[in-house]
Every structure is written in structure tokens, then in C-alpha cells.
Image (cartoon, rainbow, N blue to C red):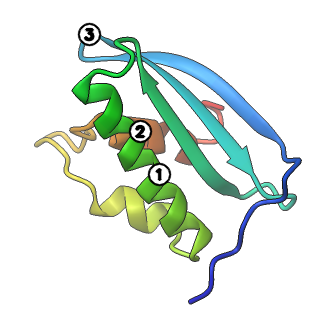
Amino acid sequence: MSREKLPNSRLNETQEFDRDGIHITMTVGFYKTGEVGEVFLNADRSNSMLDVLMSDAAILASLALQHGVPLRTITHALKRDKFGIASSPIGAALDRISTPEVL
């Protein structure tokens, strides 16, 4: 499967949210079709281990999206608690993206 890179100039949206006492900034980049093509995450504790792990997880999710993996497949694969709530910051972010009224 080949990678479909996003154009250099693209629509994006940034939002902030809190998860488990962590303030997270998320930026989502879109293809011209409106489909999500990339995700960036940063924690409020810049360059902390958590910030690095969140950023790396977002890069991996972005690469999967650019290689044609549906957003729903990615969100379904991530760990959830007994109530179905995403257990990780990347899971929470992708859930926010996959719910159109949130963005």
C-alpha cells in the first residue's frame, strides 16, 4: 500500500482538551476531501516522556491514515476501559476526531 501524502498547504484545526489531569493540544490536518490525514499531539509538560510518547503515537496514527488505514479501524484497535472509553491520550484524541460534532 502506498502512502498518500498531504499537500503542503492544507486545512487543519487545533483544539485543546484535558485528559486525566493532562492538558493536551491536538492539531488535525485534512486532505482536500475532508478526510483526516494527520494528527499532532502535545502535552502541557513539553519534552516530558509523556509528551514524547503522545507525539510518537500521533505520528504512527498519521502514517497509518496516510497508508489507507481507516480512522475507525485505528480507534477500534486501541485499548479501552470496561466502559468503552479510550485508555490513552491518543485514543481520546482519535475518538474526538471520529466524532464530527467535536471538531
Please state the horizontal and vertical placement of residue 8, each as a whole percent of the image.
84, 53
Q: Quadrant of residue 7?
A: bottom right
**Image point (79%, 58%), residue name:** 31
Are the residues tagged 2 and 3 within 8 Å (C-beta)? no
Q: Are marks 3 and 1 in contact (CB under 8 Å)?
A: no
Tell me which amino acid carries mark 2: Ser
Disc 1/disc 2 C-alpha distance (Å): 6 Å
Q: What's the mark number on residue 59? A: 1
The correct choice, above or below, for 34 with respect to 86 in the image is below
Q: Residue furthest front?
A: 47
Circle 2 packing at 10 Å, graded few (<14), some (14-19), many (20+), is: many
Where's the N terminus, which quadrant?
A: bottom right
Which of marks 3 and 2 precedes in the sequence? 3
Q: Which residue is mark 2?
A: 55
Q: Residue at x 84, y 62 (%)?
A: 33
Q: Secondary structure at mark 1?
A: helix
From the top left corner, tell me how far across and down residue 95 is, in percent. Answer: 44, 42
Q: Position of residue 32 (x, y in %)?
A: 87, 58
Secondary structure at numbered mark 3: loop
Q: Are marks 1 and 2 in contact (CB under 8 Å)?
A: yes
Question: Image check: 16 left or right of 24?
Answer: right
Residue type, label 1: Ile
Label 2's element?
A: helix
* Mark 3 or mark 1: whose residue is earlier in sequence: 3
**Distance between mark 2 and mark 3 Cα atoms:** 17 Å
Q: Position of residue 75 (x, y in %)?
A: 38, 56
The three-letter amino acid code for the residue at tag 3 is Gly
Per the rendering, the mark at residue 21 is: 3
Which residue is at 63% across, 77% downward? Answer: 3
Q: Which mark is residue 27?
A: none
